Amino acid sequence: MTKAPQALIITVNFRHAECTLQLLHSASRLDRFGDCRLMIVDNNSGDGSAERIRQAIDGFNNVELLTSASNRGYFGAAKWALDQHLVNQAAPDWVIVCNNDIIFDSPSFLAGLLVHDPRAVAVLAPAIVSRLTGFDANPMIAGRPGRIRKLRYRFLASTYYVAWLTQWLAPVVRKARRRLRDGRSDRRDARTRIYAPHGSFFIFSRRYFEEGGFIDDGCFLYAEEISVAETCWRLGLPVIHDPELKVSHNDSQTTGRMLTRKGYLLQREGLQYALGKYLESSRGA
């Protein structure tokens, strides 16, 4: 078994090679990029994406392309990549699972992450600055959902038109919430413990996996935030929002700005899975 990199970055591509190449370009300029490994999973794009990515990574000895014979979904592909990594290498201190429409704006991001103690936290939630709103998408959910919020989730996924309108209004709602939250707090740059990190960029520590955490691939797409948050909540592991770590997110580049009917069905399936497995089945909710 070879020596593990200090950080493993896993991203998933499905017919959006341009986004993946932008992520690769920004990652390759990171300070201490040589101390990490980047794994790209192509989810059976079938549009030439894999060939473009393969050409782009030629010359990088720490970047690997995995081509899946089927579309495994987001966490399905991420878990598959992590399992492949662990066949020949030890577990890294940090595992990043992110969308391919993420950009590392600051060259110091990785260096800033590697000074953290991977035994002190389970999951780190960086500042994910939305290109749509200009605000940090974290925390995705500050506190654990109660009965009213669960009912709200059910309502939002009840019909395609409700879900479509919700997604269309989402940037406006996020801006309003952020302004309200910022107006109430004078500690916007402080590290805080939260319930759920935004699903476009997870940072898992070695501790998360050593104490029983896992990447739940039971659902194709959506609601990954709840699966990670509930896993940490049940194991008593801390999820920390650290605004000093920052990335940019080109929102909806891979799933689309407007919700399609297929996207709605996947969204509903993911929410039903997360609610049924984690929130509605747990005691003390």
Image (tube, grey):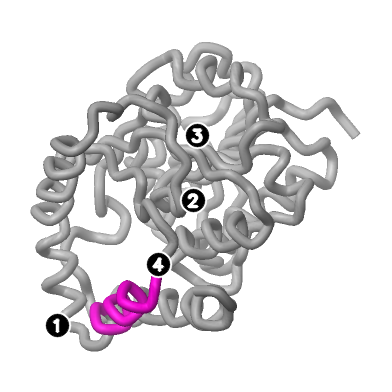
Q: Residue furthest right?
A: 1
Separation (CA) of disc 2 from disc 3: 17 Å
Separation (CA) of disc 2 from disc 1: 28 Å
Separation (CA) of disc 4 from disc 3: 45 Å
Which residue is more in the foreground, 218 or 263? 218
Is label 1 or label 3 in front?
1
Q: Amino acid at mark 4?
A: Pro
State the residue position of label 4: 145
State the residue position of label 1: 161
Q: Residue at x 65, y 53 (%)?
A: 236
Question: Which mark, by number, is residue 55?
Answer: 3
Q: Residue at x 33, y 22 (%)?
A: 105
Q: Position of residue 25 (x, y in %)?
A: 40, 25
Q: Residue at x 84, y 40 (%)?
A: 88
Prevailing secondary structure of the magenta residues: helix
Q: In this rendering, would 61 be left or right of 229?
A: right
Separation (CA) of disc 1 from disc 3: 42 Å
Q: Position of residue 7 (x, y in %)?
A: 64, 29
* Disc with the residue nearer the chain's start (4 vs 1): 4
Tell me which segment is drawn in magenta: 146-156
